Amino acid sequence: MFIRLGSLVQLSTHTRFLFTLRSDVGVYRSLLLFRLSGLGEDTPSLYVMESACPHLGADLSHAEIEDCGSDLVAVCPWHRYLMLTYDFSLSSGVSETGLKACTYTVELRCNQDAAEVWVETPEETGNWEVVELRPVSEEFADPPPPHQENVTSLRIEDASPEQPLASNNPPNTLIEWAVLILNTPDPELKVQRTRHAVNLFRTGKLKSVGRTPSAPAPPDVPPRHSGLQTVDPGKVGKRGKAGSLKSRIAMLHALANIEQWAIDLAWDIIARFGPSNTDLPLQFFSDFTKVALDESKHFSLLSGRLASLSSFYGSQPIHAALWESATSTASSLAARLAIIHLVHEARGLDVNPNTIAKFRAAGDEESVRVLEIIHLDEITHVTAGHRWFTWVCEREGCEPVPRFREEVRVHFGGKVKGPFNDEDRRKAGLTREFYEDLRGEAWDGVRLKGATVAVEYGS
């Protein structure tokens, strides 16, 4: 069986795309599309293979492509300079090491005047759907994007001078980088370090996740820059409905604050649960480094938008309500995935369209563009949460829906509110049986600090 991936025109912006398939029984497969142009050929050569190296599970999205005469091979970035190179034929998946990567047939089918790309589905039974499709990175853009100056302008008073990405003794593992970034109070430096660490991990320059007993522990609460005024959530002023410039700035600032915490949440799930869950596949770390990179992109987009409106991140008070859920789920990976990704981030899918509509009604199309980028990325983040929550359930021999509802009952307070964006929730794997008529009991009898404040991406 084959599944439609997209039109050839859609897949011509970059030379590499990562896409994720999900079956109707909850099985996930992450695959890579390579688009290579032959000399003098009008039609590109298209190849699809699994996204993880069969040896140790390293991400192949940044694999080098080498011409071996009769064949093209993808060279695992983690083993590029070792005596035993793990290279996999793009057409057959065969490696000289004896290992074999799964490859999938690609067909170009004509649909009226447009060529469409169809990909063979995995052998497992079930109906498959594409739940994520994205270019690997701007590094593989075709043509390369023009150079743009950094538009992020953070004007936090008494901001520290520019610091190096790491000290003289830089981290050697992904978890060490995660802890360093979590302990970085300056938001701009946090973004820079995130980009740097993810690039090191993807290109094989970090040889280890660092899941050892001696791995550094993440902070209980990531510090914030001294130039930011942190207040209790209940003391944050009303932000309005985007009808005025002041209201739009307040809403964008609130979203930027959530994105800064979201960067930390992505690194915290790696640093906090990686050492104690040694059976987690490398795909888990690839997924959440991608989430961290997305959240840093979102923060930069929002900060840049604030700057274009003659404001800046730090111009208004911030709160730490989102981290309260991180604290309450610090001892359980299942609880963390359920509450952060399948409750809070899923709630973002519900409220984002209304927020976008408010900015569009105000004629602020540039902010709409930013918010639409964020919304599409957030669907993939909820998908990642669903993927790894179901993985934990399979490991522990329990069904995802009742386990999710129990985690919400124990770790969340109050009703899981609608109205729900059923369409985007379903894209992420959340059917109505997950969230319909659901209420948490964590606040019953005792109110947590800030419990009256809804943590929503559009609040």
Image: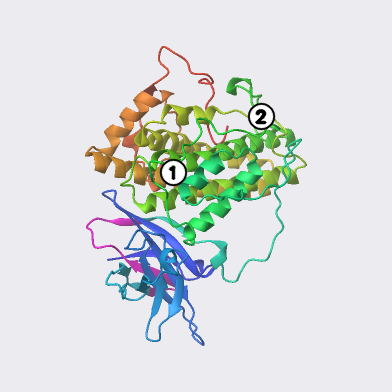
Q: Which of 357 and 171 is in front in this view?
A: 171
Q: Residue furthest top?
A: 445
**290 is higher (above) or lower (below) than 320:** below
Residue ID for mark 1: 270
| Residue at the (62%, 39%) spot, across then down | 256
Q: Which amino acid does label 2 sit on?
A: Gly
Q: Does the magenta stretch include residue 121?
A: yes
Give, as a single range, the part of the protein colored magenta: 108-129
Q: Which amino acid does label 1 sit on?
A: Ile
Left or right? Give the position of 178 relative to 387.
right
The crowding category of the residue bearing disc 2, from other C-alpha atoms within 10 Å (few below 14, some 14 to 19, many at least 20), is few
Q: Can residue 22 be seen in this view?
A: yes
| Residue at the (48%, 67%) spot, across then down | 16
- State how the image is colored: rainbow
Q: Is residue 278 magenta?
A: no
Q: Which of 147 and 79 is in front in this view?
A: 79
Q: What element carries label 1?
A: helix
**182 is higher (above) or lower (below) than 49:** above
Dot 1 or dot 2: first in sequence order is: 2
Q: Which residue lies furthest to the right in this view?
A: 310
Residue 325 percent across, percent down from the top left = 46, 29
Residue ID for mark 2: 240
Q: Quadrant of the C terminus?
A: top right
Residue 244 percent across, percent down from the top left = 73, 35
**322 is higher (above) or lower (below) than 370:** above
Q: Say the numbered circle drawn on residue 53.
A: none
